[in-house]
Every structure is written in structure tokens, then in C-alpha cells.
């Protein structure tokens, strides 16, 4: 049994910390391989501070989602509900860190969405680390993982049409534009597709 940290919401801006014993099956699932400069690992509750920083980036609020996460406690809940829970299925957004310093710089991973027919590749990085090829480096590791470990024959990626940086990265990774649609929140999105070879 491994002791894990659980943050329980009491009111819109109050959080209570619970410690409980739980064993997770997530550790049984393989991980994407490390790259020349990066490690990809499962996030833990100890990464709440980093998650708060990532969620506070202007690019997250503009291109990914609006949210009310404004404290480390709230970021811990976000991690549990949106990131860590996904690991039980063998998917999820893995934390990307610099190999030399173990500094977390972003997330990259795979998720199944009810409104998509294929698994979705997603990524988000601190803006200070943009323009260095790090997002592409981590994404290629995740794509290889999807093909060789999960036997996926295709991946999708979604973005808002005005997110030019994301669209350029998807093109670099080999994704092709599929169609424009709306997500369940009635937000306009563009869907890109990549065919995979194991």
C-alpha cells in the first residue's frame, strides 16, 4: 500500500487534505521512452506547484481552457481529477522534465475523449521552453509509444484554429488536417490526424 495525498473540496475556495492508503495499478503500465534531453514520467501530488504554474500560463487560458485553479491545493485536485486518474487506463498526460536537472517543463500524453473516434495526443509547455524543439521531442516519444506499446494505428490531435504554434508543431509531427467541428462545450476546434506504423 502506498500512502497518497487527496485534496477534498469543502467550498469554492477551501480545500481539505486527506491522507489515505491506496494502491494504484498505474505503475503496472509502461511509460514512453526517455529522449536525449527529456524524461517522461507520471505526475504525482508533489507536482501541484508546477501544475499551478502551467495552468497560469496565458497560452493555457487562451488556447486550452479557462479555469478557477488559483492555489497549489486547487492544482493538486486538478492533478488528481484530470491527470493522475488517467494513468489507471495506461494513458494520460505524462509530466515532461529536463533530464539533466529534472525540472518539469510541460505535459504530453494520450487521452480518449467521448467525442473522438481515435485517441487524442495532447501537450502543453511552459512558455519559457517554447522554440527549443522540446515539445516535438516529447511528442515523438509519445507517438512511438502509441504505435509500439499500444498498437494504435492512428492518433488525433485537437486545437483551436487560432493556435498557430500548435498547428505548426502538429504539421512537423506529420499530422494532417481532418476537419473543423465543435467540442461538447460548443467551442470551435480543428481535428488533425496521424496514421501510425508499428
Image (cartoon, grey):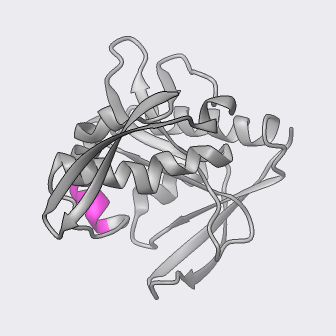
Name which residue lies at 84% across and 44% down: 151
The single residue placed furthest to the bottom in the displayed view is 186
Where residue 107 appears, as percent x and y from the top left, is 44, 42
Where residue 126 appears, as percent x and y from the top left, is 29, 42
Q: Provide the residue span drawn in magenta.
A: 56-62
The single residue placed furthest to the top in the displayed view is 100
Left/right placement of residue 18 relative to residue 155 reads left
Q: Is residue 5 magenta?
A: no
Quarter placement of the C terminus: top right
Count of number-bearing discs: 0
Name which residue lies at 81% across and 49% down: 152
Left/right placement of residue 53 relative to residue 145 reads left
Name which residue lies at 56% across and 50% down: 86
Q: Does 94 sit above or below residue 27?
A: below
**Principal secondary structure, stretch drawn in magenta:** helix
Residue 132 seen by the camera: yes
Where residue 119 appears, as percent x and y from the top left, is 69, 58
Nearest the camera: 37 or 54?
A: 54
Left/right placement of residue 19 relative to residue 92 reads left
Name which residue lies at 36% across and 18% down: 102
Residue 30 seen by the camera: no
Where residue 180 appears, as percent x and y from the top left, is 59, 81
Q: Does 81 sit above or below residue 49?
A: below
Left/right placement of residue 25 relative to residue 190 reads right
Q: Does 8 sit above or below residue 163?
A: above
On the image, which quarter does residue 62 sit in?
bottom left
Amino acid at each position: 500500500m502506498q500512502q497518497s495525498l487527496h485534496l477534498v473540496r469543502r467550498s469554492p475556495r477551501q480545500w481539505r487534505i486527506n491522507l489515505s492508503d491506496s494502491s494504484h495499478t498505474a505503475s503496472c503500465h509502461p511509460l514512453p521512452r526517455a529522449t536525449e534531453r527529456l524524461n517522461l514520467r507520471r505526475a504525482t501530488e508533489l507536482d501541484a506547484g508546477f501544475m499551478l504554474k502551467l495552468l497560469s500560463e496565458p497560452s493555457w487560458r487562451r488556447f486550452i481552457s479557462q479555469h478557477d485553479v488559483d492555489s497549489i491545493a486547487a492544482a493538486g485536485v486538478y492533478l488528481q481529477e484530470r491527470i493522475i486518474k488517467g494513468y489507471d487506463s495506461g494513458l494520460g498526460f505524462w509530466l515532461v522534465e529536463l533530464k539533466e536537472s529534472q525540472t518539469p517543463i510541460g505535459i504530453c500524453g494520450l487521452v480518449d475523449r467521448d467525442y473522438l473516434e481515435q485517441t487524442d495526443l495532447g501537450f502543453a509547455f511552459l512558455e519559457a521552453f517554447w522554440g527549443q524543439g522540446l515539445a516535438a521531442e516529447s511528442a515523438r516519444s509519445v507517438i512511438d509509444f502509441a504505435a509500439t506499446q499500444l498498437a494504435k494505428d492512428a492518433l488525433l490531435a485537437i486545437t483551436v484554429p487560432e493556435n498557430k504554434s500548435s498547428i505548426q508543431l502538429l504539421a512537423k509531427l506529420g499530422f494532417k488536417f481532418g476537419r473543423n467541428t465543435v467540442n461538447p462545450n460548443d467551442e470551435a476546434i480543428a481535428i488533425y490526424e496521424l496514421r501510425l506504423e508499428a
